[in-house]
Amino acid sequence: MTEDVVRALGFLCLGTRLKRIGERLQADTQEVIDSFDAGVVASQFPFLAALDRLGPLAVGELAEAIGVTQPGATKTTIQLVGLGFVRVEQSPEDQRRKIVGLTEKGQAVVDTAKRELWPLIDHAVADLCGGLDAPFLDQLVRIEDGLTAAPLARRVGKNLPKEGVRHDTRA
């Protein structure tokens, strides 16, 4: 069997490892969603959940609530409009701002998901995490907050020698 290099490299590949885990969780979640014939892609559900939880939002606010870039939020919003789950209207206060809200169809999908689908997925992920629910989630929050306070580039920079890193360019 081939060595799992990403796992073996520990903290050096933490981002890659978390991304890999996230992709696996999202693919498995999609399989469950497909069994419910919800007509939504797993990556779109956080957008619907945010609009359900927070009400109509400007695209920038929606991006912030999900933690994605504004172009990413715009792309997903366009997809959700095409599916009939959200509507986009101009803000009455500022014609440049676009406000995104759930349609009746979108609200119905969210209501069904909250009642039938999300509890199943939540329970399955909690089971996967082996009862480490709170401590594990707290640790993720600490990592996210730590990255916000001091991104990796800054953390690397504070550990560099004053003269920087020298690269030997001799062949």
Image (cartoon, rainbow, N blue to C red):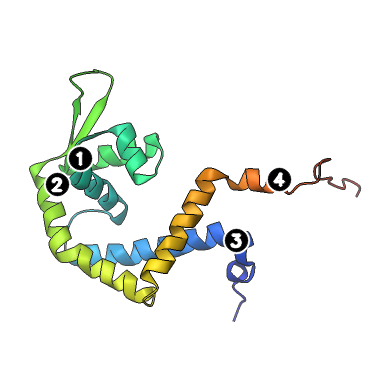
Label 3 element class: helix
Residue contact at pointers 3 and 4, CB within 8 angstroms: no
**Dot 2 corresponds to which residue?**
106
Dot 3 or dot 1, earlier in sequence: 3
Dot 4 or dot 2, earlier in sequence: 2
Dot 1 or dot 4, earlier in sequence: 1
The alpha-carbon separation of the residues under discs 3 and 4 comes to 20 Å
10 Å neighbourhood of mark 2: few (<14), some, or many (≥20)? many
Depth-wise, is mark 3 or mark 4 nearer the camera? Answer: 4
**Dot 1 corresponds to which residue?**
82
Dot 3 or dot 2, earlier in sequence: 3
Q: Position of residue 73 (x, y in %)?
A: 33, 39
Foreground of the two, 148 or 48: 148
Q: Is residue 54 positioned above or below 139 on the image?
A: above
Dot 3 or dot 4, earlier in sequence: 3
Q: Position of residue 54 (x, y in %)?
A: 22, 42
Depth-wise, is mark 3 or mark 1 nearer the camera? Answer: 3
**Dot 4 corresponds to which residue?**
158
Disc 3 marks a residue whose amino acid type is: Cys
Disc 4 marks a residue whose amino acid type is: Lys
Disc number placed over residue 13 in the picture, else none: 3
Residue plotted at (25% across, 46% down): 50
Foreground of the two, 160 or 24: 160
Left or right of residue 3, residue 117 in this image:
left
Label 1 element class: helix
The alpha-carbon separation of the residues under discs 3 and 2 comes to 38 Å
